[in-house]
Image (cartoon, rainbow, N blue to C red):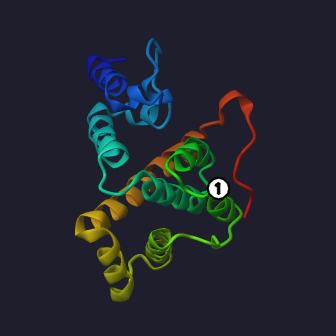
Amino acid sequence: MTPDQRAVADAIRTGPRASVGSPAAAQGATSLSSPFNVWNRSPELADRVQKLGEYLRFRTSLPPRLNEFAILITARRWDSQYEWFAHHRLAMAGGLDPAVAEDLRNNRVPANMKPDEQVVYDFVTEYFDHRGVSDATYKRAVTAFGERGVADLVAVTGYYMLVSMTLNVDRTPIPDGGPKPLPAR
C-alpha cells in the first residue's frame, strides 16, 4: 500500500468497525476486505466513503433494527450475496423478526411487519421502484422518523447501493466458500 492507502486502512482498523469484529477492521491483515479494498485504489475516495459508512452504521438516527432492515432491502434489490450475508446477522441482533427477513430473502412482501418496519419497507421499495416517493409516503416517514430519520434512511440505502454494486463487481465471495444466501429471482 501507498502511505495514503495505509492511512485509510489504519483509520478503518482503529475506528468503530474494530469494536464490532468487522472483517474490514481485521488487525494484522495485509489488505482490506471488500468493499474497502476496491475503494482504497483511490485513497481519497475510500476515506470519504468509509467515513460516511461509519456514520450510517454507528451513528444514524434510525434504530439498528430499522437501519439493518433498510440494508437488507437494498441487498435483496441488488442481489448482493455478500451484503446480505454480512448484514442478516446484524439485523437479527438488532431485533428484526427472522420471518420478515426470510420473506424478503424469498422476494415476498414481508408479512407481520411492525408499523415502523412497514414505513421503512414502503418508503425504500417505492424509492427504488419509482426513483422517488409520493407525498403520502414521505409524510408517513417524517411522522415516524422525523426529517433527520428520513435523510438517514435515504442515505443508508444510497450508501448500501454503492456497497452492493462494489461487492457485486468485486465478486466478493461468501467466507469459507459458504453458500449464497439469496435465491435467484
Q: Residue at x 35, y 57 (%)?
A: 62
Give the residue type that dot 1 points to. Answer: Pro
How many callouts does the rendering have? 1
Where residue 126 appears, as percent x and y from the top left, is 47, 77
Left of 185 or right of it: where is 128? left
Q: Residue at x 63, y 70 (%)?
A: 110
Left of 158 or right of it: where is 29? right
Residue 13: quarter of image: top left
Where residue 64 appears, as percent x and y from the top left, is 43, 51
The relative height of residue 56 versus residue 110 in the rendered view (above or below) is above
Q: Residue at x 44, y 31 (%)?
A: 20
User: Quarter of the image containing the N terminus?
Assistant: top left
The relative height of residue 142 versus residue 153 in the rendered view (above or below) is below
Closest to the observer: 52 or 19? 19
Determine the secondary structure under disc 1: helix
The relative height of residue 173 versus residue 61 in the rendered view (above or below) is above
The relative height of residue 7 versus residue 94 in the rendered view (above or below) is above
Closest to the observer: 93 or 132? 93
Where residue 58 appears, as percent x and y from the top left, is 34, 43
Residue 61: quarter of image: bottom left
Q: Residue at x 56, y 41 (%)?
A: 86
Disc 1 designates what residue? 98
Residue 141: quarter of image: bottom left
Where residue 151 appears, as percent x and y from the top left, is 28, 64
Left of 171 or right of it: where is 183? right
Closest to the observer: 158 or 145? 145
